[in-house]
Image (spheres, helix red, strand yellow):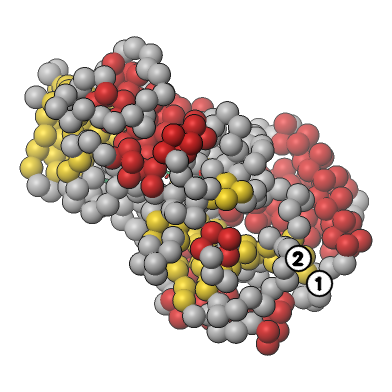
């Protein structure tokens, strides 16, 4: 019998499997896809890297990924988005009439965001668990005494914040959802592709690709894991599939999961966030800005385009769709999506925008092995629900992965740390995180 089965070869599963293997356990990883990395997925079909899932290390300071990247010798490029902060990097802002805002107008807007954010923190602190981010935002804006147009610009900024950070509409997200989102400092991306990390972690592990888990049964002697290609037995199992997969009931748990775990699965939200990369024959946007942004009215999609030329070495822009819009575009064809993005860009830059020569579009919400992009604290849930989801069940079933790490959900380092925590619980002993990149002895 195996010591531990790990379900899912994303960063959480691979971290857990690697630490357990290094500790001498017999471990098998069951992965439904034909690749490792899960939501870390680099597309290299065009001869350069396009990260369809995670791109950024958010906050290098105190981040376990920082040391891992150094040990693996991976190339990075500094590209600080500041977790959707308003200021910082030079952004070419455009007003509702699509005119480039001058320095004074941009500063006025940034000052407004800063003023509102200070009030917003208090409004959030005063909010109960059943109140939404939208409720707190409206209370804040009402307190500013601003006219409708001025308040609406900041309102749209808040909407975009939850769409991008949570993959959800502002009304769906709990007022306290972003309380723990305090990632500061420099951020980097990977010209060679972020999935170099999961590929390095996978080396030396027994990973059964193309193996879809359908059921997990607990018994006095351990666990039985049924898949579409046979059953596996082990003393313990770590399940790292995305929250969307758990919510859909794609894996049958017997006996049924206790409320302490089933409750968080039901209460937490699974957001949708998609990327659209467009490669152009030449640059048409100004040098020295890291994004083009237009201030829109409610319901107007495509508002920010990030210059990712430094990553690919080609003239490329990246834009995002989050929340309802992310789910809507998944029903459109690639051609319809590209036309819609280009139309919005031409609204800003006019005929200077040539037809793109290539595009990459993600559809994470309809991917059956993700069913969304990342989790968020929905109205009625709390940050504690993330960690409650990881509480061991009957001492043999553990959950890990993005949605189980309350301190840093929706990141890469959060699930990495959740895999570390699960491995420690399986062994019942503290484990050093160092050594994740060390070569594994395949004979052990
Ligand atoms: C578009 C997008 C952009 C992002 N950007 C960033 C970013 O810039 N920075 C950042 O830090 N984070 C980012 N994230 C979040 C980050 O990618 C994820 O939080 C992280 O990769 C999740 O790792 P995980 O191991 O928890 O899950 P996953 O990577 O999803 O791994 C779970 C694995 O389980 C497998 N699986 C599912 N069902 C089954 C089954 N029934 N049987 C067997 N296997 C199964 C899946 O195929 C998958 O490989 C982004 C995510 C998305 C989608």
Residue beneath the point at 66% across and 55% down: 159
Question: Could you say where residue 301 lies in the image, as x and y percent from the top left?
Answer: 62, 69
Give the quadrant of residue 426.
top left
Q: Which mark is residue 415?
A: none
Displayed quadrant of residue 184 = top right
| Quadrant of the frame with the C terminus | top left
Residue 297 can be seen, yes or no: no
Q: How many marks?
A: 2
Question: CB under 8 Å between callouts 1 and 2?
Answer: yes
Q: Give me the disc on residue 92.
A: 2
Q: Residues within 10 Å of mark 1 (few under 14, many from 20)?
A: some
Q: Can residue 412 be seen here?
A: yes
Name above or below for residue 284 compared with residue 21: below
Q: Secondary structure at mark 1?
A: loop
Q: Quadrant of the N terminus?
A: top left
Task: Give the image location of residue 191, x and y in percent.
Answer: 49, 55
Residue indicated by mark 1: 100
User: Residue 260, percent across and down?
Assistant: 39, 26
- Residue that appears at 82% across and 40% down: 119
Spatial distance from mark 1 to mark 2, Cα to Cα?
7 Å
Respond yes or no on whether mark 2 lies under 8 Å from ligand 1: no
Q: Position of residue 409 (x, y in %)?
A: 50, 38
Query: 10 Å neighbourhood of mark 2: few (<14), some, or many (≥20)?
Result: many
């Amino acid at each position: 019998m195996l010591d531990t089965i790990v379900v899912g070869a994303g960063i959480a599963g691979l971290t857990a499997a690697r630490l357990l293997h290094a500790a001498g356990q017999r471990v098998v990883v069951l992965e439904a896809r034909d690749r490792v990395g899960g939501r870390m997925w680099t597309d290299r079909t065009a001869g350069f890297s396009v990260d369809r899932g995670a791109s950024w290390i958010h906050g290098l300071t105190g981040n376990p990924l920082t040391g891992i990247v150094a040990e693996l010798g991976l190339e990075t490029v500094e590209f600080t988005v500041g977790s959707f902060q308003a200021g910082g990097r030079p952004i070419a802002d455009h007003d509702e009439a699509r005119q480039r805002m001058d320095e004074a107008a941009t500063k006025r807007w940034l000052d407004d965001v800063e003023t509102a954010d200070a009030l917003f923190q208090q409004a959030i602190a005063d909010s109960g668990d059943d109140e939404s981010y939208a409720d707190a935002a409206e209370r804040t804006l009402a307190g500013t005494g601003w006219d409708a147009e001025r308040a609406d610009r900041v309102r749209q900024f808040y909407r975009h914040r939850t769409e991008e950070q949570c993959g959800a509409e502002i009304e769906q997200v709990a007022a306290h959802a972003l309380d723990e989102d305090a990632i500061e400092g420099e951020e980097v991306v990977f010209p060679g592709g972020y999935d170099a990390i999961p590929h390095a972690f996978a080396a030396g592990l027994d990973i059964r690709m193309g193996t879809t888990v359908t059921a997990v049964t607990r018994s006095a002697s351990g666990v039985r894991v049924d898949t579409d290609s046979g059953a596996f037995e082990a003393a313990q199992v770590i399940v790292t599939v995305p929250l969307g997969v758990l919510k859909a009931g794609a894996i049958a748990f017997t006996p049924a999961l206790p409320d302490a775990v089933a409750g968080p699965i039901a209460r937490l939200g699974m957001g949708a966030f998609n990327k659209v990369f467009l490669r152009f024959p030449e640059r048409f946007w100004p040098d020295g800005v890291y994004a083009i942004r237009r201030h829109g009215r409610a319901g107007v999609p495509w508002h920010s385009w990030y210059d990712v030329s430094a990553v690919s070495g080609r003239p490329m822009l990246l834009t995002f769709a989050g929340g309802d819009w992310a789910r809507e575009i998944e029903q459109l064809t690639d051609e319809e999506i590209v036309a819609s993005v280009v139309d919005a860009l031409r609204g800003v830059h006019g005929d200077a925008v040539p037809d793109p020569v290539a595009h990459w579009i993600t559809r994470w919400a309809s991917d059956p092995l993700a069913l969304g992009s990342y989790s968020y604290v929905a109205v009625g849930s709390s940050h504690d629900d993330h960690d409650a989801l990881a509480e061991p069940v009957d001492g043999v079933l553990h959950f890990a992965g993005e949605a189980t790490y309350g301190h840093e959900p929706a990141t890469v380092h959060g699930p990495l740390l959740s895999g570390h925590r699960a491995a420690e619980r399986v062994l019942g002993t503290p484990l050093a995180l160092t050594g994740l990149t060390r070569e594994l002895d395949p004979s052990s």
